[in-house]
Amino acid sequence: MRYYRKIRTKTGKTCILRTPAAKDAEEILAHMRLTSGDTDYMLRYPDEITLSVKDERALLERMAASPNEIMIAGEIDGKLVANAGFSPVLPCEKARHRADFGISVQRAYWGQGIGSAILEGILDSARQAGYRQIELDVVSGNERGAALYRKFGFRTYGTLERACLLRDGSWQTLYLMVRSL
């Protein structure tokens, strides 16, 4: 699926929300590494993002051509600052109504309305793709993220204790959230 929209951030900057192209692969990977190091609320450490640029290009091309997946990047002044996407939970008939969603915004751009604008695009695109439900996990303690999801109608339906084991030996719980479309 493809997406394009311009928004104005709370700081007055223009942010282009668009489907990333294959040429954006290296910047997408750099963004993923940066945001994974910004906070312990991401599910991977920066050094665990090992996909090659070639493989990321192929992924971006596949997602852009897919009728049931999307990736939306946020770009300010030519720099990628946010990324989100959804894909099927499982490739089977009984679960074809369910999409899995994830988002990342660079710390320097938190609180500017970019996450909300991208989430609007994600929800609209998921409806267009025929999904009836969208799901996500949020790490306990990530109140900013959980508040954003609740603002858009997500509700917590469960928790997964000891879901993440950090390198320092501490544990994180995941809140499982869902929204009907």
Image (tube, rainbow, N blue to C red):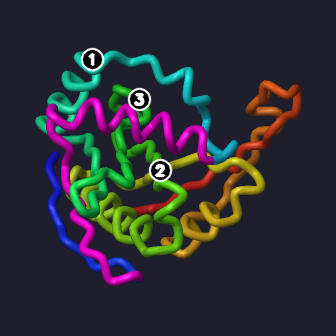
- Quarter residue 8 falls in: bottom left
Instruction: Tell me residue 151's x, y (percent).
Output: 54, 75
| Residue pointed to by mark 2 | 104
| Residue pointed to by mark 1 | 55
Q: Neighbour class for label 1 at 10 Å: few (<14), some, many (≥20)?
A: few
Residue at screen point 22% across, 50% down: 129
In the rendered view, does 15 fall on the left or right side of 105? left
Mark 2 vs mark 1: which is more N-terminal?
1
Helix, strand or loop at mark 3: loop
| Residue pointed to by mark 3 | 90
In the rendered view, does 97 fall on the left or right side of 33? left
Residue at screen point 52% across, 73% down: 111
Mark 1 vs mark 3: which is more N-terminal?
1
Instruction: Tell me residue 61's x, y (percent).
Output: 15, 30
- Quarter residue 88 falls in: top left
In this picture, which residue range is highlighted in magenta?
11-38
Asked if residue 136 is among those painted magenta in the image, a careful observer would answer: no
Q: Which of 89 and 106 is in front in this view?
A: 106
Helix, strand or loop at mark 2: strand
Instruction: Tell me residue 22's x, y (percent).
Output: 15, 32
Q: Whole-Å distance between the Cαs marked 1 and 3?
A: 21 Å
Q: Nearer the viewer, residue 71 or 29?
A: 29
Residue at screen point 76% across, 39% down: 160
Q: Whole-Å distance between the Cαs marked 2 and 1?
A: 20 Å
Would you place residue 147 above or below residue 55 in this image?
A: below
Residue lying furthest right in this view?
169
